[in-house]
Amino acid sequence: MNKLPGIFPLILLLINLSEFPVYGESGKEEFIEIELWTEISKTVPAANDENSKYLTDNELARRILEDAAWIISGMIYGFDVVYTPKDTARRVEEYLKVSPVASIPWGDKNLEITDSWNSNGKLQMQIRYYLGSGQITRKELWNSNIFPDAEGVGTVSIFEGYQGRKESVKEGIKDALRNYLRLRYTNKPREINARVLINNPPYTILDAGGYKSRVNITIKFTEIVPYAYY
């Protein structure tokens, strides 16, 4: 593993950070730190040409930063989830929608690349996000025993392209909801509406030709609709 010790080698050897307005502000004490990666091959097989074209180092870095902003948003603000389980007998197809409650904007100066290195054909980055007082309060509001935790694993084919990493996290959220409800509801619900918070950075690997993510969430159920309603 060729590890680059800090942000200055990153500027010199990897990307031109002037294209990425993401410099951490000093004086902040509470932060979220995550490690993310993307394949260095630059021609990862994908379902469409846009995902398999030749990529520059800056484009690879941008992909990681965009994923980081999405995940950290889910760790601060959470996601709204609408999920309809598949029911073959009723001819109901599965439906899943995972929407950020709020998002860290591109160029947020509290987002900082702290390290970067190449390992096993991947560009890996350590990224830190400094929390403001309002964001700290938002996270603290989730610290209650009335909101259950659950864990799930999601897998998406590598042929979905680089977006498959994010999709595997969504699938992990769905699996966590199913794992929680399976033990408490005898009958399959018609629809599940919930708000979830990602508790820890998802752990994503390449496994058997797919992106596999382990996700731990806290859940606020809005509505669980049984088939009896219809």
Image (tube, rainbow, N blue to C red):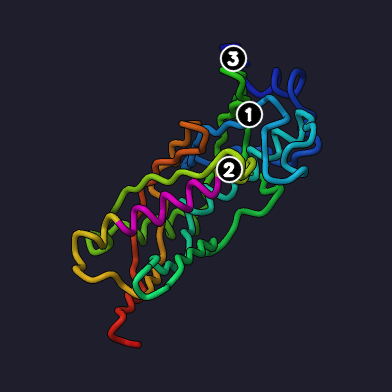
Q: Earlier in the sequence, mark 3 or mark 2?
A: 3
- Asked if labels 3 and 1 touch by Cβ distance under 8 angstroms, the answer is no
Select label 2 or label 1 by which is in front.
1
* Foreground of the two, 156 or 142: 156
- Residue in view at x 51 percent, y 64 percent: 97
Q: Residue at x 34, y 59 (%)?
A: 177
What quarter of the picture does the C terminus occupy? bottom left
User: Image point 41% across, 54% down: which residue?
Assistant: 173
Where is residue 141 drawn, in percent x and y?
36, 61
Snapshot quadrant of residue 143: bottom left
Disc number for residue 3: 3
In the figure, 228 relative to 205: above or below? below
Q: Is residue 76 left or right of residue 177?
A: right
Mark 2–mark 1 distance (CA, rounded to whole Å): 15 Å
Instruction: Report the residue marked by disc 1.
Output: 39
- What's the magenta region? 166-178
Q: Secondary structure at mark 2?
A: helix
Q: Quadrant of residue 180?
A: bottom left
Tell me if label 2 and label 1 are in contact, CB under 8 Å.
no
Residue 220, image quadrant: bottom left
Residue at the disc numbered 2:
68
Cα gap from disc 3 to disc 2, whole angstroms: 20 Å
Residue 25 seen anywhere in this rendered image of the structure: no
Of 160 and 134, nearer the camera is 160
Q: Amino acid at mark 1?
A: Glu
Residue type at tag 2: Ala
Specify few, some or many for label 1: CA neighbours under 10 Å numbering under 14, 14-19, or 20 or more.
some
Q: Which mark is residue 135?
A: none
For image coordinates 63% across by 28% down, the residue present is 39
Element under disc 3: strand
